[in-house]
Image: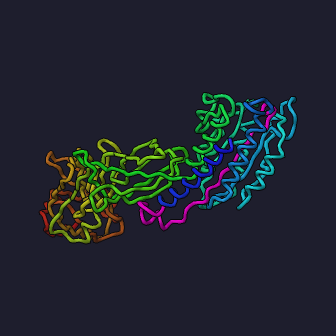
Amino acid sequence: MQKTVHRFSACLTGLFAASVLLFTGNTPLHAQEAERPLNRILLIYDASNSMNARWQSASKMAISKKLITEILDSLSTVPNLQLALRVYGHQKPYPPLDCGDSRLEVPFAPGNARKIIQTIRGLAPKGSTPIAYSLTEAAKDFPPCDNCRNLIILITDGIEECGGDPCAASRYLQRQGIALKPFIIGIGKDFSEDFYCVGEYFDASSENDFVRAFEIVISQALNTTTAQVNLLDADGSPTVSNLNMTFYDHISGKPVYNYVHTLNYRGLPDTLTLDPLHVYDLVVHTLPPSRLDSVVVRTGRHNTIALPAAQGNLTVSMKGSRASVTESTPCVVRMPGSTEIVNVQYINANNRYLAGKYDVDILTLPPVCLKNVDISPNKTTTIDLPMLGICVFRRNGGGFATLYAIDSTGRQQLIHSFGENKTTETLYLRPGTYIIVNRSRYNLRSTATREKTFVLKPGATVEVSL
């Protein structure tokens, strides 16, 4: 067994050498420059009565104590790592059942591995197994930290005995962003069916299995892995680039990484470093966003993540009009048949969208509403509009007035209501036929209503007086 633990120590040394290379080799520049997070591992250790049972050469408690203390001794020299210890089932004997028997025995602090070892050596198994309660209480064990990775390793020889829900407790920790998905090492028996929803389970049916499980857990807990994101064009080739990508934690919904996608000098997607303990929702900030949920990255290999991102351009063109008018006229791009707004661009601007069909509302007077505008990959779709005209309205004494556009069937479309106290207003209008209806505020008879029809041509200026 001593040979196995030495192997763990040697593996640990190699692990951190590899970790350093990951952060100084192919890592993007901004990831190299960023301060590495502090790794904080909370051990939740089972000291319940069942740990008195025999397990191979001695009791479960005696063997697990020996192995854990030797492993912790190896971890004591690891940089950028803090440890803490919570124990359950060690304060009151069973029976009776005590479902509150769980306590943080050693809080997080630099260089406290020796204190944890001494505490573990002094434990005597006594009580029950309140796993859900221990996980819930673990939320208080992690002091506030702006740049920490919080991890939990649960070591147990049994399942929940107090009617709690360890799965719900684990989800709470993850959704609140308190800790990543826990690791569980099950001693002496396979409890995987009971813990699959709690975290990543490792079966330690033998002493050697226990050490191997711990080795894997530490490797996953403290290492990063590499990945590339292939943004696919219309032909399925990874040629799309220069887009911001956000990796969100799938459980908590909180952003973990922002990367601006890059193609290297060979035209290949750049290599990223990712934390393998997260399940990610990847959002590429195209218009509209391109999304891939529940992305899992595997340790020990280079991961490739692919999603479609073929794009085309949209331009709403109006030549000859004043820049002050075109630059302030919004064009609302929506998903087809939906009120969901994808983007607001302006006349004579050029914007990129995922290839597909969109509804476009151009908010001139009157507005232009186009359905199912097709934006093709690597092409520019241009909507050409005639130059606006200028209309100056003069109303003696102001009053109550409205302006209508007349369509080809003679129907009136209300497009503007004039200010009651304004005697002069200037509007930029699309070419067409219009009618203004006005009644002076000083004349209280409906029969005093006046109207005037006029035609506005592209780029023309007309004056309408009432």
Q: Is residue 127 visible?
A: yes
Count of numbered circles in the view: 0
Q: Is residue 459 left or right of residue 31?
A: left
Q: Nearer the viewer, residue 105 or 334?
A: 105
Task: Indicate yes or no whether the magenta region holds residue 48.
Answer: yes
Q: Nearer the viewer, residue 266 or 381?
A: 266
Position in image of residue 311 (x %, y %): 26, 52
Give the quadrant of the C terminus. bottom left
Q: Is residue 447 visible?
A: no
Position in image of residue 68 (x %, y %): 71, 45
Q: Is residue 17 left or right of residue 91?
A: left
Position in image of residue 90 (x %, y %): 83, 40
Q: Is residue 377 left or right of residue 113?
A: left
Residue drawn 43% across and 42% down?
A: 293
Give the quadrant of the N terminus. top right
Residue drawn 30% across and 71% down?
A: 423
Q: Nearer the viewer, residue 177 or 352?
A: 177
Residue drawn 58% across and 38% down?
A: 200
Position in image of residue 33 (x %, y %): 48, 68
Q: What is the span of residues highlighted in magenta in the rendered image? A: 23-51
Q: Quadrant of residue 96?
A: top right
Task: Indicate yes or no whether the magenta region holds residue 335.
Answer: no
